[in-house]
Amino acid sequence: MKIKKSGFNSMLVHGGGFEDQLGSAVTPIYQTSTFKFRDADHGAQCFAGEDPGYIYTRIGNPTISDLENTVAMLENGFGGIATSSGMGAVTTVYMALLGMGAHMVGHNAVYGPSRVVAETIFARFGVKSTWVDTTNIQNVIDAVTPETKLIYLETPANPTIGICDIDAICAFAKSKGILVCVDNTFCSPYLQKPLDLGADIVLHSMTKFINGHADIVGGIIVTKTQELYKVVRPVMVNMGCNIDPHQSWLARRGLKTLAIRIDKAQESSMIVAEYLENHPKIAWVRYPGLKSHPQYELAKKQMNGSGAMISFEVKGGIAAGKIVMSSVEMMLLAVSLGGIETLIQHPASMTHSKMSYEARQAAGITDGLIRLAIGIEEVEDIIADLDQALARI
Ligand code: LCS
C-alpha cells in the first residue's frame, strides 16, 4: 500500500492510499466475515504472521485497514486500531494497560462512562483509579502512586471544556515510566496531535468529528509505537471490540471533509460564544477561543483552533436552562457531538448522570451547565434559535 504524506486535506482525501486491482476510486466495502486462503499452507502462514493476508474480519479487513491507516497517519502514530464505539476504544486501552492492583489517574470531567467504567467494572477486577483536575499538573503529580500505569487525559474535556497541558504531563509521566493516553475526540487530529506532544496513545469516539454525520457509532485507538500497537491490538481482537466494514466505510467517507466541516463549525462557534458571553441572561461561557477561558493561552499553544464545543450556564440555573433546551427549534435537543447539526444537551441529567452528584460537583459539572455542539448551519440561524429560546425565560 502506497502511503501518501502531504497536506492535511490531501491526506484526508487520499489517506492510506488504498488501491485495489480494479482501480476503485473509493475503497470498497469488503462486507465479508472471512477470507479464502489459497491452500492449507497459505492459511497457516497467515495465522503465523508470515503472510500479511486477511483472515477474518474481527482480526482485520481491507475497508477497516484503510480507515486505520488514514487516522494513524493523521495522528502521526504507528498504527490505528478501529473499534465498535468510542467506549470500545476506551475499554480496550484500559484492558490492555491495566491489571489486578494497577492504578490509573484520570481527568475528573471526562465523558461520564469513561470514568464510570473504571470506577465500577474495572474496579471489580482490582484496578484502582483516581480522578483529579488535570488542568493543574500538580494534582496529577500528587495522585500518582508506585502502582500507576496510566494517566488518562481528555482535553478539551467533556463537558467542562477544561484544557490540560499534554506536553508537561507527558514529560512528567515519562520521568516516572507511566504511559499517557489522550482522548482527542473534541479536537480530532485536525486541531490537536497528542502523540506529537509526547502521549503514547490517542483515542477517539469516531461517532463524533471523524465520521461527522451522526449516522454511525465507532471508535479508534492510535499508538505511537509498534511495541504498544502489539500490546493493544490483540485486546481489541480478542475482546471482540471490532468495527464493522460498513460502519468503517461510512467513517472513512465522513473523514474526507473533516477539515472543512471543522473550519465552518469553529468559525460559527466563536461567534456563538461571543454572542452568549454578551447576553444578559447568561451567567458564564466556556470556549477555548474566549479570553475568559482559564486555559486560553494553553489552548492557543496546544490546539490548532478552538473547536466547536461550548458550555454555558443560564442565569437561573437549571430551571431556566430547561426552558432554553425545550424551546430550541432548529438545533436538536440530543446527546452526541461533532456532527453537521447543532446539538444542545444537559450533562448533569444526560451524558454525566451516572457520575455521583459529589463527583460532578468536584469536576465542575454544575447542574446548570448546558453543552452546545455547533454544526455547519448558518451561524445566523443558530443564533436566531438561541435568541428565541432565551427570550422565553
Ligand atoms: N470520549 C468522548 C470524549 C466522548 O464524548 C464520547 C461519547 C466517548 C468517548 C464514547 O464514545 P461512543 O462510545 O459514544 O462512540 N460522547 C457522547 C456525548 O457527549 N454525548 O453522547 C455520547
Image: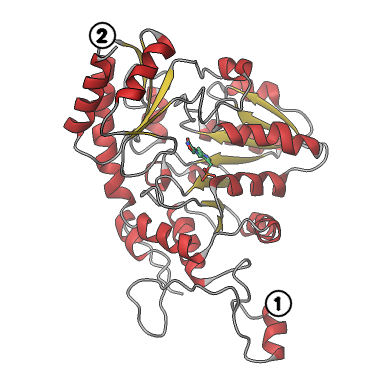
- The amino acid at mark 2 is Pro
Residue position for label 1: 47
Q: Quadrant of residue 105?
A: top right
Is 383 left, or right, of 160 in this rendering?
A: left
**Is 391 situated above or below 225?**
above
Which x, y percent locates residue 119? 71, 31
* Image spot of residue 109 (x, y percent): 55, 26
Residue under numbered circle 2: 280
Question: Mark 2 and 1 residues: CB-CB less than 8 Å, in contact?
Answer: no
Q: Residue at x 45, y 44 (%)?
A: 193
Which picture quadrant has residue 374?
top left
Q: Residue furthest left?
A: 380
Alpha carbons under labels 2 and 1: distance apart: 65 Å
In terms of depth relative to the viewer, which is nearer, 172 or 99? 99
User: Label 1 sits on what residue type?
Assistant: Phe
Task: Quarter of the image for the C terminus: give it.
Answer: top left
Question: Which residue does the image show at 63% across and 67% down from the upper left?
Answer: 59
Q: Position of residue 62 (x, y in %)?
A: 50, 72
